[in-house]
Amino acid sequence: MAAPLVLVVLAAVTVRAALYRSSLAAFIAERVEVASPLNAWKRVVEGLALLDLGVSPYSGAIFHETPLIIYLFHFLIEYAELVFMITDVLTAVALYLAIQDFNKVVFKKQKLLIELDKYAPDVAELIQTPMEMHYIPLKVALFYLLNPYTVMSCVAKSTCAINNSVIAFFILATIKGSAFLSAVFLALATYQSLYPLTLFAPALLYLLQRQFIPIKLKSKSFWLYTMQYASLYLCSLVVIICLSFFLLNSWDFIPSVYGFILSVPDLTPNIGLFWYFFAEMFEHFSLFFVCVFQINVFFYTIPLAIKLKEHPVFFMFVQLAIISIFKSYPTVGDVALYIAFLPVWSHLYRFLRNIFILSCVLIFCSFLFPVLWHLWIYAGSANSNFYYAITLTFNIGQILLISDYFYAFLRREYYLTHGLHLTRQDGTEAMLVLK
Amino acid sequence: MITMLKPSPGEQEMLWAPWDSHHRRCLAAAAVPSPRGGPGLAVWELPGVLQRRQALPCGEQPRESRRPRRSGAAKSPGDRRSPRSVLGTARPAGNHPNCDGARASPAAPISAWQKEPSESRSSASHTTRAGRDHPCGSVTALPLAPGLGPAQAQPGWLFSPRGSRLAPFCSSRDSPAARAPTASPWRPRKRRHCWRGRKRKRRGAGRGGMAAAVLLLLLAAAAGPGRADAGRERRDALREELLLSPLPTGDVAATFQFRTRWDADLQRGAVSHYRLFPKALGRLVAALGVRELHLALTQGFWRTRYWGQPPLQAPAGAELWVWFQPTVTDVDKAWKELSNILSGIFCASLNFIDSTNTVIPTASFKPLGLANGTDHHLLRYAVLPREVVCTENLTPWKKLLPCGSKAGLAVLLKAERLFHSSYHSQAVHIRPICRDASCLAVSWELRQTLTVVFDFFSSGQGKKDWSLFKMFSRTLTDTCPLASQSKVYVDISPKNKEKELLEVSPPPTSVHEAIVQGEKKTYAVYDLLSPLLFNTSRSLNVQLKWKRPQDSSEMPIPTLHAQRYVAGYGLQTGEICTLIYNTHPYRAFPVILLETVPWYLRLYVHTLTIITKGKENKPSYIHYQPAQDRRRPHLLEMLIQLPANSVTKITIQFERALLKWTEYPPDPNHGFYVGSSVLSALVPSVTAMKDMDVEQSPLFASLFPSSDGSSYFVRLYTEPLLVNLPTPDFSMPYNVICLTCTVVAVCYGSFYNLLTRTFHVEEPSRGGLAKRLANVIRKFRGVPPL
């Protein structure tokens, strides 16, 4: 099993190394889809240059990385390409291990439920077989490492790769059941980009499930464990933030990183929904709409937690997708992370309604981004609306894709308990509807 | 904020010391407010003879004492000295341009005082017209009194320099009660206080001495017109000058300078009577704690490469830089207030100066006048490159002149001609200067300058001949009676070694040679106050004719010139390139480059490259302040060493930001201006410069200091840049809001559906109204129902 993974890693490293040496690297690094103001490599270098000049990197509006990133690259700037390749490989390996473990859990759970006769009798074809599940971890690693989005992100040296890596390790720690490491990595991820805060809920659910603690609001052990995990998380967050404070000896990074993420002052175009909306917003509604748009990331967490409390990993996947759609400076690197999870849900394929159209939309949009950017910025024959239209389409595509997966997941769950061949009262074949 | 890599001692001096040595000497003796807020003097480097004279008791006296301090001051030992000896001993302070009162030789003070006949003239006869800012009309009847010879020196005025020097210290405590109407409204009440001591001394002979005084006065009047009041101290003086210089390209540059000097201390706030100095500016200086103010409004761009060094450079648009007093606590507030007030005074959009275009340079702008230190936090600098300068700015500027545009050189300032030119720049400079050589008191100087470049080569059918009338459609007819000096200089320096090619008419009163900005210049001087000039004709129309067409193949290239442009294409990124040329054949010199870039061009300082002769040139000093969105511009200051005969290319990359749609100007696709970058340098002179007589050479030598004979100060401004930014579609706000919100709603809707609903097996329904209706019809038709 390890040999194919090594092959995939080798292929991925070769592709990246080749791209680093090609003239495409500079072109890719400039792409707004790949490098946002938050994680562009150019800005990291600028921050280091400012530090060298004796200017606080946070005194300007260019640098928005966290202090730990500065210190990481302060020592590793010479090996940046290597760092990014290793990060990608580590992410893929972490995901591989996590999914491998998750598959075992799924298999055990499935077996238990069959033994307990919880499934309907005619759902044999819905049950995931070990045969099917065997290649899923490899596919996940493959999807992550050879996804063009990840490759471009890595070639552009977007620090998004580091965030992804932290999140992948968080997922690994969670699935392995280590509450401490999970809390630490979640704190790191939150510290890096704030939005992974919402992953607290699925991680907690998963750990509770693993500890066989029933999720009941009246149960004492539930609250005890929740408090334990939350305090672990908060403590590590405080430690990390204090560490950053002691590294730079100032709190300047708080407004410059988190204020920048939340208030969206930089309207450089990207693949998200924020930039054009706030470029065109009326000044006195601006604050209101910033709140409305930011709340979208956090808004779905609690309803999802209630609906998917039995399936925290799927919850994590949906939440990652929501983050990548609604974060203020999204890049294709964020999209790549949740796309890597798609093989895990390959058993939902038969219930997806419009996967073909949606994948076409996403692929065509990916090609149209640079084309319309060129028409607007360089050729001058198009205007900003063209690029905006394509971001809208891309986001609609993502939203529909996620809701399609969500729908398929719920539907499969229904079939598992109610049987695949539903009949009406009069004995004819029934349709399944949402009510 | 500041990186000092490794400047050489010379460079350190350039950065942290005032531009010149004389300046420093002046600093030493600058007047500073005493801690208690009262006036006082600080002298800490001067010879003993001056040390003694610092003991001015004004500041020491208790606040409630309304007694004039002059009496106390008069008792100080130094005061008893004759002014000549005082000035003589104070000579070490040198003949520095900034210490304008400090004339070169022991004899110089006298000749200097003699040069201002008109102030005594005018103050003699004004009796009733109190409180007017514009004394022009009242003095037209006065006889001209040119040429007060040394023999006419009165004992009375010999006291005056000191009297005037001490005056402000007394005036500061001037009580409102003391401001009773006086015999001469032109003489401020405070001065009477100051003079009381002296008068008392004179009255020492007894009350009958009054008659003697009247007699003395009569005698003095008999000695010659204008001398009646010669015993009065000198208070303020106006000197006006016009420099006409043919430029190498065939254009003609005309530079006016009106210099008002006032021996009063505006800062103390007790000055309420204004004569020549414009009240609006004087009160501004007093109220806002301004130490130095430099405002320039410019239309067009001075092409240094082709026109040579201008006497006074200014960037395109509006430039304002101000040094505030150390007593000002909230400099930003004062700056905001100042720019708004100036905006009103000059009808310019200076009110658009805010934090997004204000910077605090650390090394480029040093005080040009008297200063105690160069704590750059008291400095504010802003440029509005988009500002369009026109008549509405010229009119208020002219109104500040004592004679307005009614008499004197200002007659030539006719808006329709001035703005029909290649370049127009008007400026106001206010600064404190040393009152005299000892530099124990402060005078205030207001310079109003105006530079205009006319293009005669293209409009004059290839002829480069010009005359005053052709340029301004006016000629000079009379002088401003308030001016103590009124001169027209014509630059007739031979461009090459051959014999003169040009001819000026009428014949000049004198010819003056000087070295200005490293070049030997010959000027034909027309002294408008000289009676000879208007004897032959009623008006002066200076004309210049070229004897034979000048071969313009050989154009002198200035030692330091620069060029700047934006490189790159597209609306995403770009690069600002600055080329700095040092054409000096064998000497390298450092230059300070100041770059102010608005926040919406995001500079990446790590892309900064400085290349000279193919090698990287490391700046010895960099000060970089990154921009903050919508709050602060980028500021980049560097000290770069320019090797001899070299071109230095400085490039820095930037990224163009997308702004909010309300942040774009009405013509967003015109582009955004980036202000000129500023080059300050001490340029080594090719010609050895002698210590020249600053008073004699025209104008400008005295605003910027020159450190020694071997180099001269140059401030250059590069081209402003016009940069396009990506624009959103301005017609789209509603559409964008609707469409984006729709996408969010799609997400919300589908998730809401999936989260709140559950799957159910579809049950057969009875159908809607339409179905039931259809079934009724079907029943009639006899077909099975749906």
Image (cartoon, coloured by chain):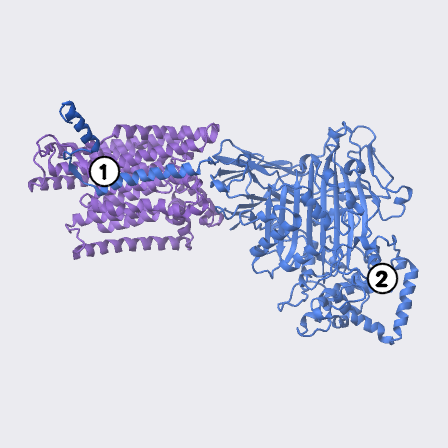
Q: Quadrant of residue B737?
A: top left
Asked if residue B28 can be seen in this view, the reply is yes
Marks 2/1 same chain: no
Q: Which chain is blue?
A: B
Query: For the residue carrying disc 2, how many other residues have a C-alpha within 10 Å: few (<14), some (14-19), or many (20+)?
Result: many
Q: Three-letter amino acid code at disc 1? A: Phe
Q: CA distance from mark 2 to mark 1?
A: 100 Å
Q: Three-letter amino acid code at disc 2? A: Asp
The answer to whether B240 appears left or right of B666 in the picture is right
Asked if residue B603 can be seen in this view, the reply is no
Task: Say above or below: B271 vs B355.
Answer: below
Q: Nearer the viewer, residue B423 or A156?
A: B423
Q: Quadrant of residue B776?
A: top left
Q: Which mark is residue A406?
A: 1
Task: Say above or below: B515 vs B112.
Answer: above
Q: Nearer the viewer, residue B357 or B250?
A: B357
Q: Residue at x 53, y 43 (%)?
A: B598
Q: Which residue is mark 2?
A: B229
The answer to whether B710 appears left or right of A412 in the picture is right
Q: Nearer the viewer, residue B73 or A329?
A: A329
Q: In the rendering, at what x and y percent does residue B115 appear?
A: 83, 54
Q: Secondary structure at mark 2?
A: loop
Task: Say above or below: B619 vs B567.
Answer: below
